[in-house]
Image (cartoon, helix red, strand yellow):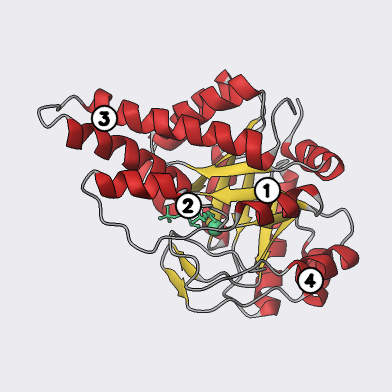
């Protein structure tokens, strides 16, 4: 079977990316699975520690169903904060884990990432590390400003840890409120990293584009989301097509799609109380969104 490492190499060669989409429930997975099948696209289904505890045992059961039903779908731990949670995910059968030591001093980040790699690689599981910090909130950690990745440290980090991919900070950020003014990704930093780490798989977190039509629909149906702004789609495309970004993380966009679909039903049909109707509409909205991402952003269609 082709593993995630194969797809990272293919993505590097052919200029596409593999989406890493977060999930919390069955409907999200069903939407991702359906869209991947139609588009013949590889995909990473990502679960944060808080999502894992929200779903409990259902997480693996649901993810296994998705992996069984569709080829090229990989289960990934998002933002693992210590060795124990990474080990737990590896032992549960995840295909890859992220050890996020980005808030730690450099040497400590190296030590913990190396330790996770040693354990994971023995079991054929891939490891993503992170260097540099994104603005925004990840689980309980709140970062006020961007701390861009230092290219020289990135090279040292990869060499010393043996990670399979590296999440870098070049101006993306987590959540729905990414910028207050005009902002651009730091392609100069990205190029420096690529010079020092040629053909190495790089990852962008916080890469939701925040579709303004979803925000309008949420607000038209009783929501109140103000000043939401995402990453410029063209910049992400450039990072995928002309650079070594092979994994694009998105959670916020799926949350917005689901909320938009649910609100629409509940606001327009006040007597509706069948969860299948409103959750089903949330699922349809996610499926449309994933289709659009696969075809217009990741270019991952027909890459299985
Ligand atoms: O990068 C963080 C993800 O969006 C996960 O968020 O911990 O609320 O599930 P969460
Ligand atoms: P967004 O908040 O931009 O969707 O980023 C999600 C993410 O990076 C998950 O790890
Ligand atoms: Zn992230």
Residue beneath disc 3: 278
Q: CA distance from mark 2 to mark 1?
A: 18 Å
Q: Quadrant of residue 130?
A: bottom right
State the image coordinates of residue 53 (x, y, percent, origin top left).
38, 48
* Label 4 SS: helix
Residue beneath disc 1: 247
Q: CA distance from mark 4 to mark 2?
A: 24 Å
Q: Is 84 positioned to the left or the right of 191 in the image?
A: left
Q: Is 300 positioned to the left or the right of 231 in the image?
A: right
* Label 1 SS: strand
Q: Is mark 2 within 8 Å of ligand 2?
A: yes
State the image coordinates of residue 176 (x, y, percent, origin top left).
43, 59
Along the line of sight, the residue nearer the viewer: 203 or 267: 267
Q: CA distance from mark 1 to mark 4?
A: 19 Å
Q: Earlier in the sequence, mark 3 or mark 4?
A: 4
CB contact under 8 Å: marks 1 and 4: no
Q: Earlier in the sequence, mark 4 or mark 2?
A: 4
Residue beneath disc 4: 188
């Amino acid at each position: 079977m082709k593993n995630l490492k194969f797809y990272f190499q293919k993505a590097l060669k052919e200029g596409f990316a593999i989406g890493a989409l977060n999930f919390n429930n069955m409907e999200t997975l069903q939407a991702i699975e359906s869209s991947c099948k139609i588009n013949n696209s590889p995909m990473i289904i990502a679960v944060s520690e808080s999502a894992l505890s929200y779903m409990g045992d259902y997480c693996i059961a649901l993810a296994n169903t998705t992996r069984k039903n569709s080829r090229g779908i990989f289960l990934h731990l998002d933002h693992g904060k210590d060795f124990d949670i990474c080990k737990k995910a590896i032992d549960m059968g995840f295909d890859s884990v992220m050890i996020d030591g980005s808030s730690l001093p450099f040497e400590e980040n190296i030590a913990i990432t190396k330790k996770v790699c040693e354990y994971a690689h023995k079991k054929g599981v891939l490891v993503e590390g992170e260097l540099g910090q994104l603005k925004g909130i990840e689980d309980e950690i709140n970062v006020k400003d961007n701390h861009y990745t230092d290219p020289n440290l990135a090279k040292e980090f990869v060499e010393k840890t043996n990670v399979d991919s590296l999440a870098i900070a070049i101006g993306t950020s987590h959540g729905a409120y990414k910028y207050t003014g005009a902002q651009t990704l730091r392609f100069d930093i990205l190029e420096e990293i690529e010079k020092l780490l040629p053909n190495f798989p790089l990852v962008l977190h916080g890469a939701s584009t925040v579709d303004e039509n979803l925000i309008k629909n949420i607000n038209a149906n009783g929501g109140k989301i103000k000043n939401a702004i995402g990453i410029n789609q063209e910049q992400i495309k450039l990072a995928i097509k002309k650079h070594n970004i092979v994994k694009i993380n998105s959670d916020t966009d799926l949350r917005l799609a689901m909320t938009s679909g649910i609100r629409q039903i509940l606001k327009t049909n006040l007597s509706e109380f069948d969860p299948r109707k409103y959750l089903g509409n949330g699922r349809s909205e996610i499926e449309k969104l994933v289709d659009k991402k696969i075809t217009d952003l990741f270019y991952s269609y027909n890459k299985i």
